[in-house]
């Protein structure tokens, strides 16, 4: 398949690995902050093919996974109302809250529907004027333009039965929080190509300068990742700390300015709690006052709900990159994709789900020898 097979060429992969082995003279720890990248790295065994001493650290790159438990509980509380049609992407339906998941609400008779786009939820609201329709607006900067467009469309249509439960997270503030932690020890970062396709990489330039940290905007295919890793290691070996763009076919430095304008119209920056990391100032998006009437938390009075994580789940450590999924006593036993304890085992971008799908049952030989 054109524009896909080219980025999975095993001959080119071996060349990049050989180049990487020639470059690396000391151990380095690189963090990818995108769940899609994590799944490619684990599924393709890239982390096990890297030269000894080059370690990939899996960061909080899954928006479903970093959605706090209290927000899931708020979603469940809203979805249980008989006057509500609750809509969400499929992954969110199975994320466990402290009292069950959205999928369990549907099993009990709640009207919970998986949709492919927030505009699908708007269309449902138009077709069902006598019921409240809520869309669970989860995601990083990548999905914010579409969610902003849905809210704006609902406003222009004068809909009074549509609202959004907002759980938008911004990557750069979380990255700086992780880098400030004493136990992280990250030497370089692979930035998520889809986030940067929207936002560009100007926000990463002061981070690279402040932490003397190479940051490489990277795509999602095996050759993208191998080239991104090689670019980051080359910077480290040369003593440079810059933002470079591996994903040139999709990303510009300034990003998509039209999408950014749409987000700024509907959302403003606000505080955000990240599962496993905690509250981070200015790390999320909230509705502006002009669109506050579409805030589902206010509309249904669920802002007071709070929750504690399952005591056996180490999702926080996994999301911070300080522990591997296989280091969890419940991994593959009490926590599986069919019966997850935490979101990283549920989401298609979750690190625990990636390890489980790849059949990782113990720390890899690469990790053991490091």
Image (cartoon, grey):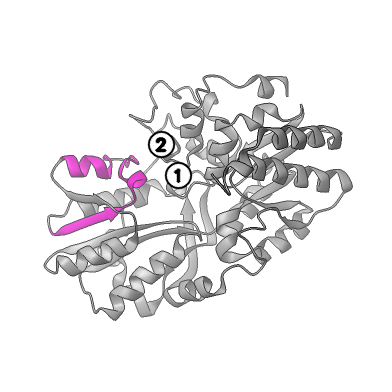
* Element on which disc 2 rests: loop
**Disc 1 designates what residue?**
65
The label on residue 331 is none
Quarter assignment of residue 93: top left
Location of residue 120 with respect to 40 vertically, above or below:
below
Give the residue pinned by disc 2.
Answer: 342
Task: Mark yes or no: residue 173 visible.
Answer: no
Which residue does the image show at 63% across and 48% down from the upper left?
Answer: 178
* Closest to the observer, 46 or 130: 46
- Identity of the residue drawn at 26% across and 61% down: 134
Q: Does the magenta run of residues contain 20?
A: no
Q: Residues within 10 Å of mark 2 (few under 14, many from 20)?
A: many
In magenta, the rendered stretch is: 83-107
- Circle 1 crowding by C-alpha within 10 Å: few under 14, some 14–19, many from 20: many
Query: Is residue 10 found left or right of 88 in the rendered image?
Result: right
Residue 198: x %, y % from top left? 55, 64
Please tell me whether mark 1 sits on a helix, a strand or a loop.
Answer: helix
Could you tell me if the residues under marks 1 and 2 are in contact, i.e. CB atoms within 8 Å? yes
Residue 110 seen in this snapshot: yes
- The percent position of residue 227, horizontal first and vertical second, equals 72, 44
Residue 368 percent across, percent down from the top left: 68, 20
Q: Quadrant of residue 297?
A: bottom left
* Residue ID at (14%, 69%): 129
Q: Earlier in the sequence, mark 1 or mark 2?
A: 1
Q: Is residue 202 left or right of residue 277?
A: right
Q: CA distance from mark 1 to mark 2?
A: 8 Å
The vertical placement of 55 against 234, above or below, is: above
Q: Residue furthest front?
A: 2
């Amino acid at each position: 398949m054109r524009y896909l097979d080219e980025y999975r060429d095993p001959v080119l992969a071996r060349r990049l690995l050989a180049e990487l082995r020639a470059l690396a003279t000391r151990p380095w720890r690189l963090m990818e902050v995108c769940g899609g990248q994590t799944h490619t790295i684990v599924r393709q065994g890239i982390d096990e093919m890297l030269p000894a001493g080059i370690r990939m650290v899996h960061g909080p790159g899954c928006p479903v996974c970093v959605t706090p438990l209290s927000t899931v509980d708020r979603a469940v509380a809203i979805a249980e109302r008989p006057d509500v049609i609750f809509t969400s992407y499929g992954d969110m339906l199975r994320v466990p809250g402290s009292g069950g998941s959205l999928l369990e609400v549907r099993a009990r008779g709640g009207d919970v529907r998986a949709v492919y786009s927030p505009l699908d939820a708007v269309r449902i609201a138009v077709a069902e004027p006598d019921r409240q329709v809520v869309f669970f607006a989860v995601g990083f900067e990548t999905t914010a333009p579409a969610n902003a467009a849905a809210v704006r469309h609902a406003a222009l249509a004068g809909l009074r039965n549509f609202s959004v439960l907002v759980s938008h997270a911004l990557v750069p503030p979380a990255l700086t929080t992780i880098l400030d932690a004493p136990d992280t020890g990250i030497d370089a970062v692979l930035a998520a190509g889809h986030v940067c396709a929207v936002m560009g990489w100007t926000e990463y330039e002061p981070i690279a300068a402040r932490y003397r940290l190479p940051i490489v905007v990277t795509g999602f295919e095996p050759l993208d990742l191998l080239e991104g890793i090689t670019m980051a290691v080359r910077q480290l070996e040369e003593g440079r700390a810059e933002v470079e763009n591996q994903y040139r076919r999709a990303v510009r430095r300034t990003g998509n300015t039209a999408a950014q304008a749409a987000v700024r119209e509907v959302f403003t920056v606000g505080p955000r709690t990240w599962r496993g990391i905690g509250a981070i100032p200015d790390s999320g998006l909230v509705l502006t006052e002009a669109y506050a009437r579409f805030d589902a938390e206010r509309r249904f009075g669920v802002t007071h709900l709070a929750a504690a994580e399952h005591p056996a789940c180490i999702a926080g450590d996994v999301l911070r990159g300080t522990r591997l999924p296989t280091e969890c006593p419940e991994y593959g036993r009490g926590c599986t994709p069919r019966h997850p304890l935490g979101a990283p085992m549920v989401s298609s971008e979750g690190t625990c789900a990636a390890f489980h799908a790849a059949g990782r049952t113990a720390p890899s030989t690469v990790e053991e020898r490091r």
